[in-house]
Amino acid sequence: MGVEARKPPPQIALKVRRALGGKAGWNGVAVQLVFGAILAWMAYEIISNARTNLETQHIAAGFGFLQNSASFDVNQTLISYSASDTYFRVFLVGVLNTLLVSVIGIFFATVIGFVVALCRLSPNWLLSRVGGLYVEAIRNLPLLFQILFWYLAVLAALPSPRQSVSVLGAFFLNNRGVIVPSALGQPGLVPFLAALALGLVASLALRSYAKRALFGQGRVIRIWPYVLILLVGLPLATILAFGPPVTFELPQLKGFNFAGGTRIIPELVALTVGLSTYTAAFIAEIVRAGILSVHKGQMEAGSSLGLSRGATLRLIVVPQAMRVIVPPLTNQYLNLTKNSSLAVAIGYPDLVSVFAGTALSQTGQAIEIIAMTMGVYLLTSLVTSAIMSVYGWRISRSLGA
Amino acid sequence: MKRVTLALSLALAAGLSAQAADAQTLKTIKDRGTLSCGVSQGLPGFSSPDDKGNWTGIDVDVCRAIAAAVFNDPTKVKFVSLSAKDRFTALQSGEIDVLSRNTTWTISRDTSLGANFTGVTYYDGQGFMVKKSLKVNSALELNSASVCVQTGTTTELNLADYFKANNMKYEVIAFGTIDEAVKAYESGRCDVFTDDSSGLYATRLKLTSPADHVVLPEIISKEPLGPMVRHGDDQWFDIVKWTLFAMVTAEELGITQKNVDEMVKSDKPELKRVLGTDGNLGEQLGLTKDWVIRIVKAVGNYGESFDRNVGAGSPLKIARGVNALWTKGGLQYAPPIR
């Protein structure tokens, strides 16, 4: 029989004292509690006072308005929406439009940013000057101005719907946007997607198996013929068995505009182009700084192993640079998301435009609507930061830092 | 972001002030020395600044008339230019004392914004403007059109109603300010620009080639435009309301900017009451006995203001139409000053 370990004394009280009181001990805890109480009382007073004052002035208050019908239209909706839907639906439409532009913008900003950074670091004189020129020109001009430029200048150059630029009679470009054939799902769609998903999962499993075989036993397995069969052959087989997964509806000119087909509105294009090129200039500098922060010995080590410049960057330098890049990159992603509220200047129906703009002035409920809008941006930003933190943490872990 | 600032100041005003419904507007204005008046961002005929920054227009005249009645000086006005969607928040938060910005009187605005309409400066209706080259003669031919509009207006709502009622499809592109909407219309992004019809005529003047654009005959809504004040100060509500009525009454009685000094000497009982040589109606409002004289001297009567800003004497050349006096078959009617 072993000797039982003595139970440690209860530590909760001590922990509270240390966390709240610090060096001041229990007195400090008391001060903190009083301070907290005062803050809570002030918050309560402000909210209740606001409610009474709004009531005495007969300004409508509360969130009941969200159930009322909005009775105005929006020109780009990712979910079905009509004028008879509620303000809450308008809110969702706005949130989705904001997220759409942010996600597309973040993707392109990252790609352009990395490319420009690599250009700037390139030993090629012309490439590095072009990269430098891009960064200096773009980041020193106001963003609103750039978005208006993309919108008005590019719009003015495009023809009217009746003189559309047509590609193969299926794609059209005019000042109402880009019109592409829309895909209509057919009965064959479900088996097709299932086959595609199956092929993808199986290929990934195969790859990890081959990797383990390579690292564990030093066996090289050729997997690409199997992957080809899984990713191309299997879906093709389902098409033969169940018929085509989708058919395409061609856009046709009817009256003022095209009917049929899917349209990408110029506001979305202008806003995404403006946001991503602008943010890319900052991302390029962050990436450049990150890469330069990796000791040049790493680059030399790569060369001495016989790796090409590209392979050295991809396999050795960039993974180490990511640790430095990720935190400021997160800032840029957050900036892009928040800057998307400039949409209102060019009539893109984002959250600020349709909800904090139109819905606000139709209902007059400024406090509620602005609070909800701020809440959405806060939540989006926190989620983005959280994702990036997890990513940064994984990089640090894999580098063993 | 002006809107966020306004919303925050409203939240603070509502949250921190002990008495937001403060019945001291007149005193506040007198202490401050200027009237703060919310106007548009530039709508010729209603409120627009010239190259020297002087504001003119029929909505501006209402502000000047109030300033004249309070200070005997129509220049003591601070004009705050507001976009359609910022206007109510600016009034609620107390940044402006009166909103005189081609704003349509509706029941929901009258009841849920904590503000009241004081009268109608201009009876308007919504219309459509298109390029002549489209060869459209009626709004009913606008199926599948793209429409540019200023966001946060009744215009946006009427548009949805009209196209739905007539079973037509359309695409709406809503802009924060009227200038942005007009720019997009000119660049060809939209087939149609819609606004109150007076605004359409005013906008057409600002286009590069006004003759290439045509205003369609349909008027799809009632748009009575008028000034607004905050709830909770009945005296101030009365002053703004009766300033407009005084301008209409002056036109009824034939009092003009030129002849007002002659009229004062008249011994007709009605003229004596209105011009304050008899009784103290002005003092009951919280103003002076000669309040109507001050107003007419500053901006003229309603008809003079109309002609100078939007009517025959202006580039807009809009006919009086329904805005004529009730005695001439129009809708402008003031309750008696007695």
Image: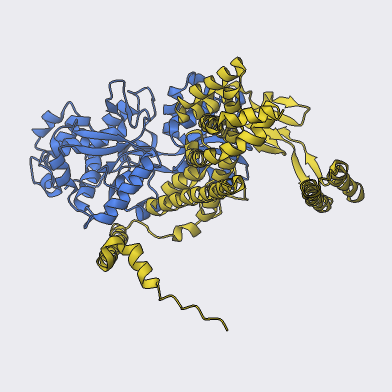
In the rendered image, the residue lying farthest to the top is: A126
Instruction: Establish if A31 lies above or below A329.
Output: below
Residue A366: image x %, image y %? 38, 50
Asked whether residue A67 appears in the rendered view, the answer is: yes
Q: Nearer the viewer, residue A250 or B197?
A: A250
Residue B143: image x %, image y %? 63, 38
Residue visible at 38% across and 30% down in the picture: B43
Q: Nearer the viewer, residue B240 or A150?
A: A150
Residue visible at 36% across and 39% down in the picture: B2
Q: Nearer the viewer, residue B216 or B48?
A: B48
Residue visible at 51% across and 24% down in the picture: A135
Residue A381: image x %, image y %? 49, 47
Q: Is residue A271 left or right of residue B55?
A: right
Q: Quadrant of residue B313?
A: top left
Instruction: Establish if A29 lies above or below B273.
Output: below
Asked whether residue B271 appears in the rendered view, the answer is: no
Chain A, colour shown: yellow
Quadrant holding the N terminus of chain B: top left
Q: Nearer the viewer, residue A198 or B208?
A: A198
Chain B, colour shown: blue
Q: Is residue B225 left or right of residue A114?
A: left
Residue B110: image x %, image y %? 35, 52
